[in-house]
Image (cartoon, rainbow, N blue to C red):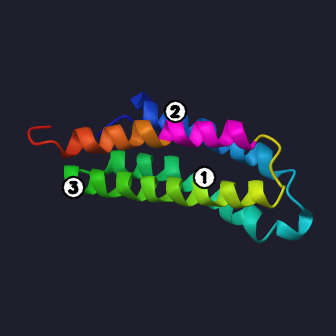
């Protein structure tokens, strides 16, 4: 089994979740069951899928869950963009930068694992 705690991608994704939760506390109350919930679920999905992938026995399954995590990250970037345009985010740049950094590291991990002989 792989140790997700040793992955930079997990560390960044986990930090992103904390930032997202702090930021969404300031979203309007009427968004609690709408955008707030969706943003939080997408954010939590990223490290959760990394953890689940690390628990899988095959490289194929591991990559599948990393791909799902990457998809959730891209979903989150759209939702953050929307929240920014709606005027809900005060720290949009910080969140966008953390999401971009996480995407680069996660993409790098996925690409490294897909290389022949990896």
Q: Earlier in the sequence, mark 2 or mark 1?
A: 2
On the rendered structure, is 108 left or right of 32?
left
Q: Residue at x 72, y 64 (%)?
A: 37
Residue topped by disc 1: 43
Q: Residue at x 85, y 57 (%)?
A: 27
101 in magenta: yes
Seen in the picture, residue 49 relative to 15 is either above or below; the reply is below
On the rendered structure, is 101 left or right of 87?
left
In the rendered image, the quadrant that contains the N terminus is top left
Please name the predominant secondary structure of the magenta segment in the image. helix
Count of labels shown?
A: 3
On the rendered structure, is 42 left or right of 27?
left
Of residues 57 and 61, the one nearer the viewer is 61
Where residue 70 appears, as percent x and y from the top left, is 43, 53
Residue topped by disc 2: 11
Where residue 56 appears, as percent x and y from the top left, is 29, 52
- Label 3 and label 2: CA atoms lie apart by 22 Å
Residue 9 visible in the picture: yes
Q: Earlier in the sequence, mark 3 or mark 1?
A: 1
Where residue 39 appears, as percent x and y from the top left, is 67, 59
User: Which circle marks residue 60 in the picture?
Assistant: 3
Of residues 18 and 112, the one nearer the viewer is 112
Q: Residue at x 10, y 42 (%)?
A: 116
Secondary structure found at label 3: helix
- Label 3 and label 1: CA atoms lie apart by 23 Å
- Seen as rendered, the residue at the extreme left is 117
Question: Is disc 2 in contact with disc 1, using a CB cutoff of under 8 Å?
Answer: no
Q: Earlier in the sequence, mark 3 or mark 2?
A: 2
110 in magenta: no
* Residue 19 sits in quarter: top right
Magenta segment boundaries in residue numbering: 92-102
């Amino acid at each position: 089994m792989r140790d997700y705690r040793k992955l930079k991608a997990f560390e960044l994704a986990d930090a992103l979740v904390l930032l997202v939760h702090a930021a969404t506390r300031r979203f309007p109350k009427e968004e609690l069951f709408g955008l707030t919930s969706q943003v939080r679920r997408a954010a939590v999905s990223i490290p959760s899928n990394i953890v689940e992938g690390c628990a899988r026995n095959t490289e194929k399954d591991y990559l599948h869950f990393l791909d799902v995590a990457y998809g959730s990250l891209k979903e989150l970037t759209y939702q953050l963009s929307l929240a920014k345009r709606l005027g809900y985010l005060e720290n949009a740049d910080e969140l966008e930068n953390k999401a971009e950094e996480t995407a680069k590291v996660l993409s790098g991990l996925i690409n490294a694992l897909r290389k022949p002989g990896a």
